[in-house]
Image: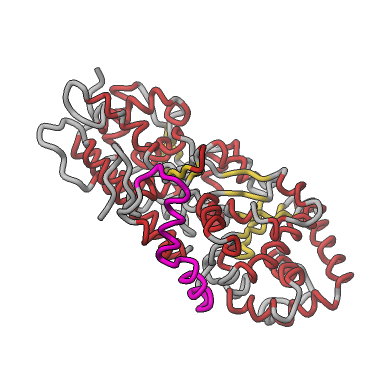
Amino acid sequence: MKQPFPIGRTREALLTSLPDIDQATSDPPAEVAFTYVPPSHAQALDIDNPIVEGIRGAGKSFWWAALHSERHRRFVASAFPEARIGKNILTSQGFGSSSKPRSYPGKDAIAKLSGKYAPRHLWRAIIATQIDVPLPYPQTGTSWDKKVIWVKEHPEEYDDLLYQQDDELAKQKKIRLVLFDALDRLADDWSAIRPLARSLFQAALDFRGYRNIRLKIFVRPDMLEDRDILGFPDASKLLARKITLEWRRADLYALLFQCLGNAKSGGDAFRSHCLKEFYLNWSHDEDNNAWVLPKDLRMEEGIQKEIFHAITGPAMASGPSAHKRGFPYTWLVNHLMDGRNQVSPRSFCAALRVASQQDTLKAWEYALDYKAIQTGVQEASRIRVNEMTLEDYPWIETVMNPLKSKITVPCLERDIISIWKENEIIRLLHRSMKKGVKLPPQHFDEGPKGILKDLEALGVIQFLGGDRIQMPDVYRIAFSLGRRGGVKPLR
């Protein structure tokens, strides 16, 4: 029987490493040691894969920022060579959540420009700026209006300059990689976003013809499923190179252990215990001042489970029949999974961060207990729902509020639609759309069934057989829907 990790030092490590670890933000952590590259993400970072798909919180904006950070590229190249991030890569950002008017126009400027010029000319101007196309293309300090006009009026010169730049990069053995993210922030409604996003994807297809210029677009699944965005000729050639940012269970725990092993406080005790009890030795990357995760902790779920249970205890309950309530290693991930069967590292880290802040049960010999983990999942659900309803899709709160405490899942589709009709949800949504609500349901024109389709696309619900609907705990708990035998919803 393996000895539990020391309670005090382990909780210190959790508290000092997890608060700032979020591979979902638009800013990479200050310490590169807290960066982990799952196998699927290594393919996503490959410069030859232009489309990177991921759910909210999967790490799209993190990698958009990290790839632009020389320190992070250097660490990834050293610790995760499978990502093929060479020293010859020069990066720039063509659009994202951060405001960078000298690099790319913001949302309001884009609205003004797209009202006068074709989106194609706008993107080509942005790309030319990012890859330092020389004169006679307008240089730094020139307004975006003048740059777009120049691209529109000088198509042949533009193409010549691009090929010259491509040849020069080839001579220097350099690759210029232009990064795009947060396409949902191009505008406030789908009618404006669609032509802009469509034109960017068409530009990505066009630029596949260059040897040393690459585009990489980080995008949500629902956009790639929109025919009005990807319904152009040869779009399949782009999608054939699409990589999905997925976090398998082993990846999430590998990220956790990477953080714990590099924690400023308690990290030394965690590494020491790994060596003493599990014979796992951590190597040190002197160049990046980072402890490198042992290979077995990246892939071997059996070892991962043993280590996590030495932190939490072996079951989600106490007593002789505790094992019937589930095992922490699997229970935590299962209850954070969305309707697309994916878990974001943001939710995972939030649950453990909150769990580490709870008082431990009396006489509990582990750093975390099962009740603290349950509380962590409840808080992760609240955070996830707030992100969806306050930041991205306010309409979700409108359609979910009437269902609170009135629905137990799984339920029938007609049960939800009946409550919506009773509360005149379609009328309320229509009124809010007139006020300019951000990103209304994509399939609003299809009525209640269209709204359910959008909720499914976002992973908020799942359709089961026989018109039954399920809602995963990561949303159900905060939306206050019941489920027999499940974690209690928030009230």
Query: Horizontally, is 41 left or right of 414 in the view?
Result: right
Residue 471 screen position, x and y as percent: 42, 46
Q: Position of residue 462 (x, y in %)?
A: 49, 44
Residue visible at 56% across and 57% down? 450
Question: Which residue sits at x=38%, y=24%?
Answer: 303
Query: Vertically, is 200 above or below 44?
Result: below
Above or below 71: residue 144: below
- Residue 153 falls left or right of residue 195: right
* In the displayed structure image, the side of residue 55 where residue 139 appears, left or right: right
Q: Front-most of 166 and 465?
A: 465
Q: Measuring 52% from the left and 72% from the top, which residue is drawn there?
A: 430
Q: Residue at x 64, y 71 (%)?
A: 192
Tell me where the magenta segment starts and ends, as one range: 408-436
> Based on the displayed image, in which of its 4 quarters is residue 418 positioned?
bottom left
In the current view of this chain or complex, which residue is farthest to the left? Answer: 362
Residue 74 coordinates in the image, percent (x, y)? 55, 47
Q: Main secondary structure of the magenta part?
A: helix
User: Furthest residue to the right?
Assistant: 156
Say how many tags the image has: 0
Residue 17 image offset from top left, x and y in percent: 33, 47
In the image, is residue 69 part of the stretch drawn in magenta?
no
